[in-house]
Image (spheres, grey):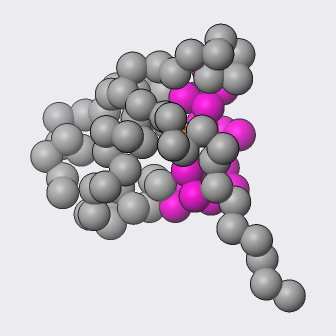
């Protein structure tokens, strides 16, 4: 049996994903794989805020709910 890939339904409109979704370093890809294209969207703080308020958080907020760090911003 082939497992269906879980993709966040907010992927197209998410401000965080729009800003960082093209990043190619392994650490970024791991975040997208876990949350945005994986099974953990329910743990994503950006997702929770969108569901609760109807609005996305600022683009520089990670799925963890913390600001994107300077180091992460430098990664490709
Ligand atoms: S950051 Fe959260 S809300 Fe945005 S696409 Fe990824 S899982 Fe969905």
The residue shown at (71%, 40%) is 42
Image: 59 above or below 34: above
**Residue occupying the point 39% across, 62% down:** 29
Question: Which image quadrant is residue 45 in?
Answer: top right
Residue 50 lies in quadrant = top right
Camera sees residue 57: yes
* Dominant secondary structure (helix, strand or loop) of the stretch shown in magenta: helix
Q: Is residue 41 magenta?
A: yes
Image spot of residue 18 (x, y percent): 37, 40
Question: If the image is split into quadrants, where does the N terminus sit?
Answer: bottom right
Residue extending furthest toward the front: 12
Which residue in the rendered view is the most extreme toward the top? 53
Q: Which residues are magenta?
A: 33-49
Q: Residue 44: where, in percent of width, then height? A: 60, 37
Residue that protrudes farthest toward the bottom in the picture = 1
Q: Position of residue 72 (x, y in %)?
A: 24, 44
Q: Along the line of sight, which residue is nearer the eye, 63 or 7?
A: 7
Q: Nearer the viewer, residue 38 or 71?
A: 38
């Amino acid at each position: 049996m082939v497992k269906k890939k879980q993709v966040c339904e907010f992927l197209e409109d998410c401000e965080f994903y729009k800003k960082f979704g093209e990043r190619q370093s392994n650490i970024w890809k791991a975040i997208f794989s876990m949350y945005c294209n994986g099974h953990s969207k329910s743990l994503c703080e950006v997702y929770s805020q969108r569901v609760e308020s109807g609005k996305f958080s600022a683009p520089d907020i990670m799925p963890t709910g913390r600001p994107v760090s300077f180091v992460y911003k430098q990664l490709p």
